[in-house]
Amino acid sequence: MDPRLLQRSRGVRSSLVAGVALALVGVLLLVGQAWWLARLVDQAFAEQRLDPTVLLLAVTCVGGRAVLAWGSAVVAARAAVTVRAELREAVVAEVLDPRRLGPRPSSARVTTLLGAGLDPLDGYVGRFLPQLVVTATVPPLVVVVLLLVDPLSALIVGLTVPLVVGFLVLVGLATQDRMSARWGELSRLGRHFSDLVGGVRTLLVLGSRQERGLRVTGERHRRATMDALRSAFLSSLVLELFSTLSMAIVAVATGLRIVDGGLSLQTGLFVLLLAPEAYLPVRRLGAQFHDSEAGVAAAREALDLLDAPRHHGDRGVPASPAIVVDGVRVDRGVGAPEVVVGDAVVLPGELVAVAGPSGVGKSTLLDTLLGFVPLSAGALTLGGVPVDEVDVVAWRRRVAWVPQLPAVPAGTIGDAVLLGAGGSRDDVVQALADAGAEDLDPDRVVREDAGDLSAGERRRVAIARALLRVRAGGVDLLLLDEPTAGLDAAREQRVIETVRGLGVTTLVVAHHPAVLHAADRVLELGRVPEPVR
Protein backbone atom coordinates (compact mmCIF):
# COMPACT_ATOMS: atom_id res chain seq x y z
CA MET A 1 0.00 0.00 0.00
CA ASP A 2 1.25 3.47 -0.89
CA PRO A 3 1.50 5.37 2.42
CA ARG A 4 0.52 8.57 0.61
CA LEU A 5 -2.93 7.07 0.06
CA LEU A 6 -3.35 6.63 3.81
CA GLN A 7 -2.33 10.22 4.42
CA ARG A 8 -4.63 11.75 1.82
CA SER A 9 -7.72 9.56 2.01
CA ARG A 10 -9.86 9.43 5.11
CA GLY A 11 -11.97 6.79 3.38
CA VAL A 12 -9.01 4.38 3.21
CA ARG A 13 -8.19 4.91 6.88
CA SER A 14 -11.80 4.36 7.92
CA SER A 15 -12.00 1.27 5.72
CA LEU A 16 -8.89 -0.27 7.31
CA VAL A 17 -10.10 0.41 10.85
CA ALA A 18 -13.52 -1.05 10.07
CA GLY A 19 -11.84 -4.00 8.33
CA VAL A 20 -9.73 -4.85 11.38
CA ALA A 21 -12.76 -4.69 13.68
CA LEU A 22 -14.87 -6.84 11.37
CA ALA A 23 -12.02 -9.34 10.92
CA LEU A 24 -11.66 -9.79 14.68
CA VAL A 25 -15.39 -10.36 15.09
CA GLY A 26 -15.27 -12.73 12.12
CA VAL A 27 -12.51 -14.81 13.74
CA LEU A 28 -14.58 -15.20 16.90
CA LEU A 29 -17.61 -16.32 14.89
CA LEU A 30 -15.43 -18.62 12.80
CA VAL A 31 -13.97 -20.38 15.84
CA GLY A 32 -17.41 -20.65 17.40
CA GLN A 33 -18.90 -22.09 14.23
CA ALA A 34 -16.17 -24.74 13.89
CA TRP A 35 -16.35 -25.68 17.57
CA TRP A 36 -20.12 -26.02 17.79
CA LEU A 37 -20.42 -27.86 14.48
CA ALA A 38 -17.74 -30.29 15.61
CA ARG A 39 -19.56 -30.68 18.93
CA LEU A 40 -22.85 -31.28 17.10
CA VAL A 41 -21.40 -34.02 14.86
CA ASP A 42 -19.60 -35.64 17.79
CA GLN A 43 -22.82 -35.82 19.77
CA ALA A 44 -24.70 -37.25 16.79
CA PHE A 45 -22.18 -40.07 16.21
CA ALA A 46 -20.75 -40.74 19.67
CA GLU A 47 -23.74 -40.01 21.91
CA GLN A 48 -26.57 -40.62 19.41
CA ARG A 49 -28.33 -37.40 20.42
CA LEU A 50 -28.80 -33.84 19.23
CA ASP A 51 -28.53 -30.98 21.72
CA PRO A 52 -30.84 -28.09 20.67
CA THR A 53 -28.62 -25.57 22.47
CA VAL A 54 -25.55 -26.65 20.52
CA LEU A 55 -27.56 -26.55 17.29
CA LEU A 56 -28.80 -23.04 18.09
CA LEU A 57 -25.27 -21.84 18.84
CA ALA A 58 -23.96 -23.31 15.57
CA VAL A 59 -26.79 -21.75 13.54
CA THR A 60 -26.21 -18.42 15.31
CA CYS A 61 -22.52 -18.44 14.38
CA VAL A 62 -23.30 -19.33 10.76
CA GLY A 63 -25.93 -16.60 10.54
CA GLY A 64 -23.61 -14.11 12.25
CA ARG A 65 -20.90 -14.78 9.68
CA ALA A 66 -23.41 -14.26 6.86
CA VAL A 67 -24.51 -10.92 8.31
CA LEU A 68 -20.88 -9.98 8.88
CA ALA A 69 -20.01 -10.79 5.25
CA TRP A 70 -22.87 -8.58 4.06
CA GLY A 71 -21.78 -5.76 6.36
CA SER A 72 -18.17 -6.06 5.19
CA ALA A 73 -19.26 -5.85 1.55
CA VAL A 74 -21.34 -2.74 2.24
CA VAL A 75 -18.52 -1.02 4.15
CA ALA A 76 -16.01 -1.88 1.42
CA ALA A 77 -18.27 -0.66 -1.41
CA ARG A 78 -18.94 2.64 0.35
CA ALA A 79 -15.23 3.06 1.07
CA ALA A 80 -14.40 2.53 -2.61
CA VAL A 81 -16.91 5.18 -3.68
CA THR A 82 -15.62 7.58 -1.02
CA VAL A 83 -11.97 7.13 -1.99
CA ARG A 84 -12.68 7.63 -5.68
CA ALA A 85 -14.63 10.80 -4.92
CA GLU A 86 -11.86 12.08 -2.63
CA LEU A 87 -9.15 11.52 -5.22
CA ARG A 88 -11.20 13.04 -8.03
CA GLU A 89 -11.89 16.14 -5.93
CA ALA A 90 -8.21 16.32 -5.00
CA VAL A 91 -7.12 16.04 -8.65
CA VAL A 92 -9.51 18.81 -9.70
CA ALA A 93 -8.34 21.00 -6.82
CA GLU A 94 -4.71 20.27 -7.74
CA VAL A 95 -5.20 21.27 -11.36
CA LEU A 96 -6.86 24.52 -10.27
CA ASP A 97 -4.48 25.24 -7.37
CA PRO A 98 -2.74 28.56 -8.12
CA ARG A 99 0.11 27.67 -5.74
CA ARG A 100 1.19 24.63 -7.72
CA LEU A 101 4.74 24.80 -9.09
CA GLY A 102 6.00 23.26 -12.28
CA PRO A 103 4.18 22.39 -15.50
CA ARG A 104 0.49 21.70 -15.48
CA PRO A 105 -0.57 18.11 -16.22
CA SER A 106 -1.80 17.44 -19.72
CA SER A 107 -5.53 17.47 -20.35
CA ALA A 108 -5.38 13.85 -21.58
CA ARG A 109 -3.76 12.74 -18.30
CA VAL A 110 -6.37 14.57 -16.22
CA THR A 111 -9.21 13.27 -18.40
CA THR A 112 -7.99 9.69 -18.01
CA LEU A 113 -7.79 10.03 -14.24
CA LEU A 114 -11.15 11.73 -13.81
CA GLY A 115 -12.80 9.26 -16.17
CA ALA A 116 -12.11 5.55 -16.17
CA GLY A 117 -8.60 5.93 -14.78
CA LEU A 118 -9.69 5.70 -11.13
CA ASP A 119 -12.27 2.94 -11.66
CA PRO A 120 -9.73 0.20 -10.69
CA LEU A 121 -9.86 1.65 -7.16
CA ASP A 122 -13.19 -0.17 -6.77
CA GLY A 123 -11.37 -3.49 -6.87
CA TYR A 124 -8.42 -2.22 -4.87
CA VAL A 125 -10.24 -0.43 -2.03
CA GLY A 126 -13.50 -2.37 -2.21
CA ARG A 127 -12.08 -5.90 -2.39
CA PHE A 128 -8.31 -6.13 -2.08
CA LEU A 129 -7.68 -3.92 0.97
CA PRO A 130 -10.45 -5.56 3.07
CA GLN A 131 -9.11 -8.97 2.04
CA LEU A 132 -5.59 -7.82 2.90
CA VAL A 133 -6.77 -6.99 6.43
CA VAL A 134 -8.48 -10.37 6.72
CA THR A 135 -5.35 -12.15 5.47
CA ALA A 136 -3.18 -10.35 7.98
CA THR A 137 -5.56 -11.11 10.85
CA VAL A 138 -7.27 -14.47 10.37
CA PRO A 139 -4.41 -16.97 9.64
CA PRO A 140 -2.28 -15.98 12.68
CA LEU A 141 -5.29 -16.18 15.00
CA VAL A 142 -6.33 -19.53 13.53
CA VAL A 143 -2.81 -20.88 14.16
CA VAL A 144 -2.99 -19.65 17.77
CA VAL A 145 -6.35 -21.39 18.31
CA LEU A 146 -5.04 -24.60 16.71
CA LEU A 147 -1.98 -24.43 18.94
CA LEU A 148 -4.26 -24.60 21.98
CA VAL A 149 -6.13 -27.70 20.80
CA ASP A 150 -3.67 -29.54 18.49
CA PRO A 151 -0.02 -28.36 18.35
CA LEU A 152 0.87 -30.69 15.45
CA SER A 153 -1.81 -29.27 13.16
CA ALA A 154 -0.84 -25.77 14.24
CA LEU A 155 2.77 -26.54 13.29
CA ILE A 156 1.77 -27.83 9.84
CA VAL A 157 -0.46 -24.84 9.16
CA GLY A 158 2.13 -22.42 10.54
CA LEU A 159 4.80 -23.79 8.19
CA THR A 160 2.69 -24.11 5.03
CA VAL A 161 0.81 -20.80 5.10
CA PRO A 162 4.05 -18.76 4.72
CA LEU A 163 4.94 -20.95 1.72
CA VAL A 164 1.65 -20.08 0.06
CA VAL A 165 2.25 -16.40 0.84
CA GLY A 166 5.74 -16.72 -0.65
CA PHE A 167 4.32 -18.04 -3.90
CA LEU A 168 1.84 -15.17 -3.85
CA VAL A 169 4.73 -12.69 -3.60
CA LEU A 170 6.57 -14.37 -6.47
CA VAL A 171 3.45 -14.22 -8.62
CA GLY A 172 3.01 -10.56 -7.73
CA LEU A 173 6.55 -9.69 -8.72
CA ALA A 174 6.13 -11.56 -12.01
CA THR A 175 2.93 -9.70 -12.93
CA GLN A 176 3.86 -6.23 -11.70
CA ASP A 177 5.58 -5.27 -14.95
CA ARG A 178 2.65 -6.53 -17.00
CA MET A 179 0.15 -4.47 -15.04
CA SER A 180 2.37 -1.40 -15.35
CA ALA A 181 2.52 -1.99 -19.09
CA ARG A 182 -1.28 -2.27 -19.20
CA TRP A 183 -1.67 1.08 -17.39
CA GLY A 184 0.85 2.64 -19.77
CA GLU A 185 -1.10 1.38 -22.76
CA LEU A 186 -4.31 2.79 -21.28
CA SER A 187 -2.67 6.19 -20.70
CA ARG A 188 -1.26 6.30 -24.22
CA LEU A 189 -4.61 5.28 -25.67
CA GLY A 190 -6.30 8.06 -23.68
CA ARG A 191 -3.83 10.69 -24.88
CA HIS A 192 -4.13 9.46 -28.46
CA PHE A 193 -7.92 9.53 -28.36
CA SER A 194 -7.91 13.00 -26.76
CA ASP A 195 -5.65 14.33 -29.52
CA LEU A 196 -7.90 12.81 -32.18
CA VAL A 197 -11.01 14.38 -30.67
CA GLY A 198 -9.24 17.74 -30.48
CA GLY A 199 -8.39 17.56 -34.19
CA VAL A 200 -11.60 16.01 -35.43
CA ARG A 201 -11.69 18.24 -38.51
CA THR A 202 -8.21 17.14 -39.53
CA LEU A 203 -9.31 13.57 -38.80
CA LEU A 204 -11.92 13.86 -41.55
CA VAL A 205 -9.11 14.50 -44.02
CA LEU A 206 -6.61 11.99 -42.61
CA GLY A 207 -9.21 9.61 -41.28
CA SER A 208 -7.94 6.33 -42.67
CA ARG A 209 -4.42 6.70 -41.30
CA GLN A 210 -5.53 7.95 -37.89
CA GLU A 211 -8.20 5.28 -37.65
CA ARG A 212 -5.57 2.65 -38.33
CA GLY A 213 -3.28 4.14 -35.68
CA LEU A 214 -6.09 4.14 -33.12
CA ARG A 215 -6.90 0.52 -33.96
CA VAL A 216 -3.25 -0.49 -33.48
CA THR A 217 -3.09 1.30 -30.11
CA GLY A 218 -6.30 -0.36 -28.98
CA GLU A 219 -4.99 -3.75 -30.04
CA ARG A 220 -1.85 -3.24 -27.93
CA HIS A 221 -4.05 -2.38 -24.96
CA ARG A 222 -6.14 -5.52 -25.55
CA ARG A 223 -3.04 -7.71 -25.65
CA ALA A 224 -1.67 -6.20 -22.45
CA THR A 225 -5.03 -6.79 -20.74
CA MET A 226 -5.21 -10.41 -21.91
CA ASP A 227 -1.63 -11.04 -20.73
CA ALA A 228 -2.59 -9.73 -17.31
CA LEU A 229 -5.69 -11.96 -17.22
CA ARG A 230 -3.62 -14.98 -18.28
CA SER A 231 -1.22 -14.33 -15.42
CA ALA A 232 -4.14 -13.96 -13.03
CA PHE A 233 -5.62 -17.36 -13.94
CA LEU A 234 -2.24 -19.12 -13.80
CA SER A 235 -1.36 -17.60 -10.45
CA SER A 236 -4.76 -18.58 -9.03
CA LEU A 237 -4.13 -22.17 -10.18
CA VAL A 238 -0.75 -22.20 -8.43
CA LEU A 239 -2.20 -20.88 -5.17
CA GLU A 240 -5.09 -23.32 -5.25
CA LEU A 241 -2.71 -26.23 -5.87
CA PHE A 242 -0.38 -25.45 -2.98
CA SER A 243 -3.26 -24.63 -0.61
CA THR A 244 -4.90 -27.96 -1.45
CA LEU A 245 -1.68 -29.91 -0.88
CA SER A 246 -1.10 -28.14 2.43
CA MET A 247 -4.62 -28.88 3.61
CA ALA A 248 -4.26 -32.49 2.51
CA ILE A 249 -1.26 -32.88 4.83
CA VAL A 250 -3.32 -31.58 7.76
CA ALA A 251 -6.27 -33.81 6.87
CA VAL A 252 -4.14 -36.98 6.56
CA ALA A 253 -2.31 -36.33 9.84
CA THR A 254 -5.56 -35.57 11.66
CA GLY A 255 -7.41 -38.59 10.21
CA LEU A 256 -4.66 -41.04 11.14
CA ARG A 257 -4.58 -39.81 14.72
CA ILE A 258 -8.37 -40.06 14.99
CA VAL A 259 -8.22 -43.66 13.79
CA ASP A 260 -5.40 -44.48 16.23
CA GLY A 261 -7.26 -42.85 19.09
CA GLY A 262 -4.65 -40.15 19.61
CA LEU A 263 -7.20 -37.45 18.86
CA SER A 264 -10.86 -37.21 19.79
CA LEU A 265 -13.49 -36.97 17.07
CA GLN A 266 -14.64 -33.53 18.20
CA THR A 267 -11.10 -32.12 18.27
CA GLY A 268 -10.28 -33.67 14.91
CA LEU A 269 -13.42 -32.26 13.30
CA PHE A 270 -12.70 -28.88 14.86
CA VAL A 271 -9.21 -28.89 13.32
CA LEU A 272 -10.50 -30.01 9.92
CA LEU A 273 -13.17 -27.29 9.92
CA LEU A 274 -10.85 -24.53 11.14
CA ALA A 275 -7.60 -25.27 9.30
CA PRO A 276 -8.91 -24.45 5.77
CA GLU A 277 -9.85 -20.98 7.02
CA ALA A 278 -6.14 -20.25 7.44
CA TYR A 279 -5.55 -20.81 3.72
CA LEU A 280 -8.78 -19.33 2.37
CA PRO A 281 -7.88 -15.64 2.96
CA VAL A 282 -4.52 -16.11 1.22
CA ARG A 283 -6.19 -17.78 -1.77
CA ARG A 284 -8.75 -15.00 -2.04
CA LEU A 285 -6.02 -12.40 -1.72
CA GLY A 286 -4.15 -14.04 -4.59
CA ALA A 287 -7.27 -14.04 -6.74
CA GLN A 288 -7.78 -10.30 -6.06
CA PHE A 289 -4.13 -9.36 -6.28
CA HIS A 290 -4.37 -8.38 -9.94
CA ASP A 291 -7.23 -6.02 -9.12
CA SER A 292 -4.87 -4.43 -6.63
CA GLU A 293 -2.14 -3.96 -9.25
CA ALA A 294 -4.47 -1.92 -11.46
CA GLY A 295 -5.75 -0.01 -8.42
CA VAL A 296 -2.24 0.70 -7.14
CA ALA A 297 -1.18 1.95 -10.59
CA ALA A 298 -4.22 4.26 -10.73
CA ALA A 299 -3.65 5.51 -7.18
CA ARG A 300 0.05 6.09 -7.86
CA GLU A 301 -0.79 8.08 -10.99
CA ALA A 302 -3.16 10.31 -9.01
CA LEU A 303 -0.82 10.66 -6.04
CA ASP A 304 2.15 11.54 -8.25
CA LEU A 305 0.07 14.32 -9.74
CA LEU A 306 -0.97 15.50 -6.27
CA ASP A 307 2.61 15.54 -4.95
CA ALA A 308 3.75 18.53 -7.00
CA PRO A 309 5.63 21.23 -5.03
CA ARG A 310 3.74 24.31 -3.94
CA HIS A 311 4.38 27.88 -2.98
CA HIS A 312 4.31 28.49 0.73
CA GLY A 313 5.02 32.21 0.72
CA ASP A 314 2.65 34.62 2.41
CA ARG A 315 4.39 37.99 2.16
CA GLY A 316 2.87 40.95 0.39
CA VAL A 317 4.57 42.95 -2.34
CA PRO A 318 4.84 46.78 -2.15
CA ALA A 319 3.00 48.87 -4.71
CA SER A 320 4.85 49.41 -8.01
CA PRO A 321 7.76 47.21 -6.97
CA ALA A 322 11.20 47.30 -8.53
CA ILE A 323 12.25 43.94 -9.97
CA VAL A 324 15.81 42.86 -9.18
CA VAL A 325 17.36 39.83 -10.87
CA ASP A 326 20.56 38.47 -9.33
CA GLY A 327 22.12 35.53 -11.16
CA VAL A 328 18.89 33.57 -11.57
CA ARG A 329 19.18 29.95 -12.64
CA VAL A 330 16.22 27.76 -13.55
CA ASP A 331 16.46 24.03 -14.21
CA ARG A 332 13.81 23.16 -16.77
CA GLY A 333 14.18 19.40 -16.42
CA VAL A 334 16.16 16.48 -17.73
CA GLY A 335 17.49 17.04 -21.23
CA ALA A 336 16.72 20.78 -21.27
CA PRO A 337 19.44 23.42 -20.89
CA GLU A 338 19.55 25.46 -17.72
CA VAL A 339 18.20 29.00 -18.02
CA VAL A 340 20.53 31.68 -16.68
CA VAL A 341 19.70 35.37 -16.26
CA GLY A 342 22.43 37.71 -15.08
CA ASP A 343 22.06 40.81 -12.95
CA ALA A 344 19.28 43.17 -13.99
CA VAL A 345 16.99 45.78 -12.46
CA VAL A 346 13.58 46.82 -13.79
CA LEU A 347 12.43 50.11 -12.30
CA PRO A 348 8.75 51.02 -11.77
CA GLY A 349 7.15 52.36 -14.94
CA GLU A 350 9.87 51.08 -17.28
CA LEU A 351 9.23 49.26 -20.53
CA VAL A 352 11.94 46.59 -20.80
CA ALA A 353 12.24 44.29 -23.79
CA VAL A 354 13.59 40.77 -23.21
CA ALA A 355 15.50 39.56 -26.26
CA GLY A 356 17.65 36.61 -27.23
CA PRO A 357 17.61 33.50 -29.44
CA SER A 358 14.71 31.06 -29.27
CA GLY A 359 14.88 28.62 -26.37
CA VAL A 360 17.17 30.79 -24.27
CA GLY A 361 14.61 31.25 -21.49
CA LYS A 362 12.74 34.48 -22.18
CA SER A 363 9.32 32.95 -21.46
CA THR A 364 10.82 31.11 -18.47
CA LEU A 365 11.80 34.47 -16.97
CA LEU A 366 8.16 35.56 -17.15
CA ASP A 367 7.11 32.25 -15.58
CA THR A 368 9.43 32.87 -12.62
CA LEU A 369 7.94 36.34 -12.12
CA LEU A 370 4.48 34.76 -12.04
CA GLY A 371 5.62 32.03 -9.64
CA PHE A 372 4.98 29.16 -12.07
CA VAL A 373 8.58 27.90 -12.01
CA PRO A 374 10.84 27.69 -8.92
CA LEU A 375 14.38 29.05 -8.95
CA SER A 376 17.28 26.63 -8.84
CA ALA A 377 19.79 29.29 -7.78
CA GLY A 378 20.18 33.05 -7.53
CA ALA A 379 17.62 35.57 -6.34
CA LEU A 380 14.63 37.36 -7.82
CA THR A 381 13.00 40.03 -5.67
CA LEU A 382 9.84 42.09 -6.09
CA GLY A 383 10.17 45.29 -4.14
CA GLY A 384 12.77 43.63 -1.93
CA VAL A 385 10.64 40.53 -1.30
CA PRO A 386 12.07 37.23 -2.66
CA VAL A 387 9.70 35.71 -5.21
CA ASP A 388 9.60 32.38 -3.35
CA GLU A 389 8.30 34.18 -0.23
CA VAL A 390 5.58 36.10 -2.05
CA ASP A 391 1.89 35.28 -1.69
CA VAL A 392 1.53 34.31 -5.36
CA VAL A 393 -2.27 34.36 -5.32
CA ALA A 394 -2.35 38.01 -4.23
CA TRP A 395 0.59 38.89 -6.47
CA ARG A 396 -0.95 37.44 -9.64
CA ARG A 397 -4.03 39.63 -9.11
CA ARG A 398 -1.68 42.57 -9.67
CA VAL A 399 -0.17 41.19 -12.87
CA ALA A 400 -1.62 41.35 -16.38
CA TRP A 401 -0.16 38.63 -18.59
CA VAL A 402 -0.37 37.80 -22.27
CA PRO A 403 1.26 34.38 -22.84
CA GLN A 404 2.75 33.21 -26.10
CA LEU A 405 -0.26 30.95 -26.73
CA PRO A 406 -3.19 32.76 -25.08
CA ALA A 407 -6.44 30.95 -24.34
CA VAL A 408 -9.89 32.29 -25.13
CA PRO A 409 -12.78 30.71 -23.20
CA ALA A 410 -16.07 29.75 -24.77
CA GLY A 411 -18.54 32.60 -25.12
CA THR A 412 -18.39 35.96 -26.84
CA ILE A 413 -15.25 37.92 -27.58
CA GLY A 414 -16.55 40.66 -25.32
CA ASP A 415 -16.85 38.22 -22.40
CA ALA A 416 -13.28 37.07 -23.04
CA VAL A 417 -12.00 40.65 -22.91
CA LEU A 418 -13.94 41.39 -19.71
CA LEU A 419 -12.60 38.26 -18.01
CA GLY A 420 -10.86 39.22 -14.77
CA ALA A 421 -11.43 42.97 -15.18
CA GLY A 422 -15.01 43.99 -15.82
CA GLY A 423 -16.19 47.12 -17.60
CA SER A 424 -18.71 48.38 -20.11
CA ARG A 425 -19.18 47.56 -23.75
CA ASP A 426 -17.51 50.84 -24.70
CA ASP A 427 -14.45 49.80 -22.67
CA VAL A 428 -14.34 46.51 -24.56
CA VAL A 429 -14.61 48.24 -27.95
CA GLN A 430 -11.84 50.68 -27.01
CA ALA A 431 -9.55 47.93 -25.72
CA LEU A 432 -10.05 45.91 -28.91
CA ALA A 433 -9.27 48.98 -31.03
CA ASP A 434 -6.10 49.71 -29.04
CA ALA A 435 -5.05 46.08 -29.52
CA GLY A 436 -5.51 46.35 -33.27
CA ALA A 437 -8.63 44.19 -33.18
CA GLU A 438 -11.27 46.73 -34.17
CA ASP A 439 -12.43 44.29 -36.84
CA LEU A 440 -13.53 41.75 -34.20
CA ASP A 441 -17.19 41.97 -33.15
CA PRO A 442 -17.52 41.86 -29.33
CA ASP A 443 -20.74 39.85 -29.76
CA ARG A 444 -19.08 37.17 -31.87
CA VAL A 445 -19.40 33.74 -30.27
CA VAL A 446 -16.31 31.51 -30.16
CA ARG A 447 -16.07 27.82 -29.40
CA GLU A 448 -14.54 26.34 -26.28
CA ASP A 449 -11.14 25.72 -27.89
CA ALA A 450 -11.29 29.03 -29.84
CA GLY A 451 -10.52 27.01 -32.96
CA ASP A 452 -12.56 29.45 -35.05
CA LEU A 453 -10.10 32.26 -34.19
CA SER A 454 -6.70 32.56 -35.80
CA ALA A 455 -3.55 32.72 -33.67
CA GLY A 456 -3.27 36.46 -34.36
CA GLU A 457 -6.91 37.08 -33.40
CA ARG A 458 -6.50 35.20 -30.13
CA ARG A 459 -3.36 37.19 -29.35
CA ARG A 460 -5.15 40.48 -29.99
CA VAL A 461 -8.09 39.44 -27.78
CA ALA A 462 -5.60 38.60 -25.01
CA ILE A 463 -3.87 41.98 -25.42
CA ALA A 464 -7.23 43.75 -25.19
CA ARG A 465 -8.01 41.81 -22.02
CA ALA A 466 -4.66 42.83 -20.50
CA LEU A 467 -5.19 46.48 -21.46
CA LEU A 468 -8.61 46.47 -19.83
CA ARG A 469 -7.17 44.94 -16.66
CA VAL A 470 -4.47 47.61 -16.41
CA ARG A 471 -6.98 50.42 -17.00
CA ALA A 472 -9.29 48.98 -14.34
CA GLY A 473 -6.53 49.63 -11.78
CA GLY A 474 -4.67 47.46 -9.30
CA VAL A 475 -2.12 46.17 -11.82
CA ASP A 476 1.57 46.81 -11.09
CA LEU A 477 3.19 44.66 -13.79
CA LEU A 478 2.35 43.89 -17.40
CA LEU A 479 3.98 40.81 -18.95
CA LEU A 480 3.77 40.36 -22.72
CA ASP A 481 5.18 37.35 -24.57
CA GLU A 482 5.54 38.08 -28.29
CA PRO A 483 2.47 40.35 -28.29
CA THR A 484 2.90 41.64 -31.85
CA ALA A 485 3.69 38.36 -33.58
CA GLY A 486 1.42 37.97 -36.58
CA LEU A 487 0.38 41.67 -36.64
CA ASP A 488 0.98 44.00 -39.54
CA ALA A 489 3.17 47.08 -39.10
CA ALA A 490 0.28 49.51 -38.49
CA ARG A 491 -1.37 47.38 -35.81
CA GLU A 492 1.99 46.60 -34.23
CA GLN A 493 2.73 50.32 -33.89
CA ARG A 494 -0.69 50.95 -32.38
CA VAL A 495 -0.16 48.23 -29.77
CA ILE A 496 3.30 49.64 -28.92
CA GLU A 497 1.97 53.16 -28.48
CA THR A 498 -0.89 51.90 -26.31
CA VAL A 499 1.45 49.92 -24.04
CA ARG A 500 3.85 52.87 -23.69
CA GLY A 501 0.96 55.11 -22.70
CA LEU A 502 -0.14 52.85 -19.83
CA GLY A 503 2.68 53.96 -17.54
CA VAL A 504 2.89 50.58 -15.82
CA THR A 505 6.02 48.45 -15.42
CA THR A 506 6.18 46.27 -18.53
CA LEU A 507 8.34 43.33 -19.58
CA VAL A 508 7.84 42.31 -23.18
CA VAL A 509 9.45 39.33 -24.88
CA ALA A 510 10.10 40.35 -28.45
CA HIS A 511 12.13 39.74 -31.59
CA HIS A 512 10.68 42.50 -33.78
CA PRO A 513 12.92 45.57 -34.14
CA ALA A 514 9.95 47.94 -33.70
CA VAL A 515 9.30 46.62 -30.19
CA LEU A 516 13.01 46.61 -29.27
CA HIS A 517 13.45 50.23 -30.41
CA ALA A 518 10.37 51.37 -28.49
CA ALA A 519 11.61 49.87 -25.18
CA ASP A 520 13.45 51.90 -22.57
CA ARG A 521 16.04 49.14 -22.27
CA VAL A 522 16.72 45.74 -23.80
CA LEU A 523 17.64 42.79 -21.59
CA GLU A 524 19.66 40.32 -23.66
CA LEU A 525 19.60 36.68 -22.61
CA GLY A 526 22.20 34.22 -23.89
CA ARG A 527 22.33 30.46 -23.78
CA VAL A 528 24.76 28.93 -21.31
CA PRO A 529 26.79 26.06 -22.83
CA GLU A 530 25.62 22.64 -21.70
CA PRO A 531 28.10 20.66 -19.58
CA VAL A 532 30.09 17.97 -21.36
CA ARG A 533 29.09 14.49 -20.23
Image: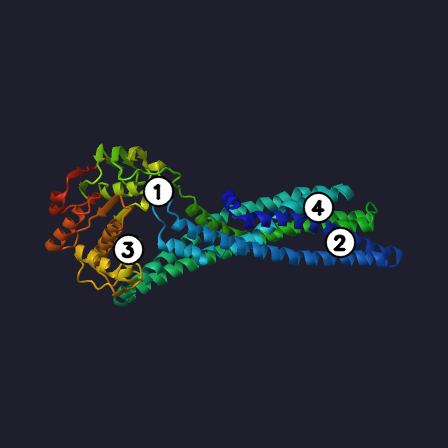
Q: Earlier in the sequence, mark 2 or mark 4?
A: 2
CB within 8 Å, label 1 to label 3: no
CB within 8 Å, label 2 to label 4: no
Q: Callout 3: helix, strand or loop? A: loop
Residue placed at 11% from the left, 47% from the top? 514
Expressed as whole percent of the image width and height from the top left, the position of residue 327 reads 25, 32
Disc number at residue 33?
2
Q: Earlier in the sequence, mark 3 or mark 2?
A: 2
When asked about the image quadrant of residue 166, the answer is top right
Q: Earlier in the sequence, mark 4 or mark 1?
A: 4
Label 1 packing within 10 angstroms: few (<14), some (14-19), many (20+): many
Label 2 packing within 10 angstroms: few (<14), some (14-19), many (20+): many
Closer to the observer: label 3 or label 2?
Answer: 3
Q: CA distance from mark 4 to mark 1?
A: 58 Å
Label 3 packing within 10 angstroms: few (<14), some (14-19), many (20+): some
Q: Callout 4: helix, strand or loop? A: helix
Q: Earlier in the sequence, mark 3 or mark 4?
A: 4
Q: Amino acid at mark 2?
A: Gln
Closer to the observer: label 2 or label 1?
Answer: 1
Q: CA distance from mark 1 to mark 3?
A: 21 Å
Label 4 packing within 10 angstroms: few (<14), some (14-19), many (20+): many
CB within 8 Å, label 3 to label 2: no
Residue at mark 4: 142
Q: Callout 1: helix, strand or loop? A: helix
Q: From this viewpoint, is residue 530 visible?
A: no
When asked about the image quadrant of residue 117, the answer is bottom left
Residue at mark 1: 392
Expressed as whole percent of the image width and height from the top left, the position of residue 132 reads 59, 48
Residue at mark 3: 407
